[in-house]
Amino acid sequence: MRFTRLALVVSTIAFAACGGGESSSNAAATTTDTAAAAGSAATGTAGSASAAPITGTTHVVRMVGDAQGYRYEPANITVKQGDGIRFEMVSGGPHNVAFNPGDIPADVKPQLSANMPNQMTELSSPMFMNAGESYTISFANIKPGAYNYHCTPHLAMNMRGVITVE
């Protein structure tokens, strides 16, 4: 019985990861245009907000899984309003970038959602399986604060970080 439950859990995770792989190639196609396309991809959760383009620096955060563990490099990053973050898949996938919707202030959630293209679920990027895939989030029109994020498949392995918007 234990084996059956384990097999079911592993199958569910694998199925979810494979389902996100097709969308990831679209999300990886561009880096600066990704945030601009976010509005149409997130209309169901964005409400009246529309995607705000990156007007500042695009920072890079690497998604890594190896013998040292699962992590974002850097995990904690400070950006300015208008900056963007490009999350790059390096190894150990599947990886994604997700915010807990209950932790995001109600006045920030519509804009953050609009700035996240091709969401798998609310405030969650697609899954990335292959090295070189990337996902860019704009932090334009996001009010200053600290925003916790994580990798859904590796949350139990402490793959998480904090984005501080100044």
Image: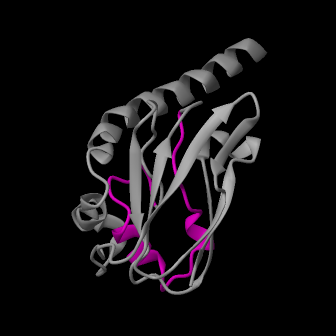
Task: Report the side of 165 relative to 69 (left or right).
Answer: left
* Image coordinates for residue 130, horizontal then vertical, percent: 44, 30
Which portion, as a residue range, is magenta? 94-122
- Please say if 109 is above or below 31: below
* Image coordinates for residue 47, horizontal then vertical, percent: 32, 77
What residue do we see at 69% from left, 21% from top?
Answer: 5
- Please say if 4 is above or below 86: above
Q: Return the residue nearer the eye: 41 or 58.
A: 58
Residue 37 among magenta residues: no
* Image coordinates for residue 57, horizontal then vertical, percent: 41, 71
Quarter of the picture containing the C terminus is bottom right
What residue do we see at 63% from left, 26% from top?
Answer: 9
Residue 116 among magenta residues: yes
Q: Is residue 61 visible?
A: yes
Instruction: Quadrant for residue 74, please give it.
Output: bottom right
Q: Is residue 1 visible?
A: no
* Image coordinates for residue 69, horizontal then vertical, percent: 74, 36
- Please say if 150 is above or below 51: above
Q: Return the residue nearer the eye: 106 or 90.
A: 90
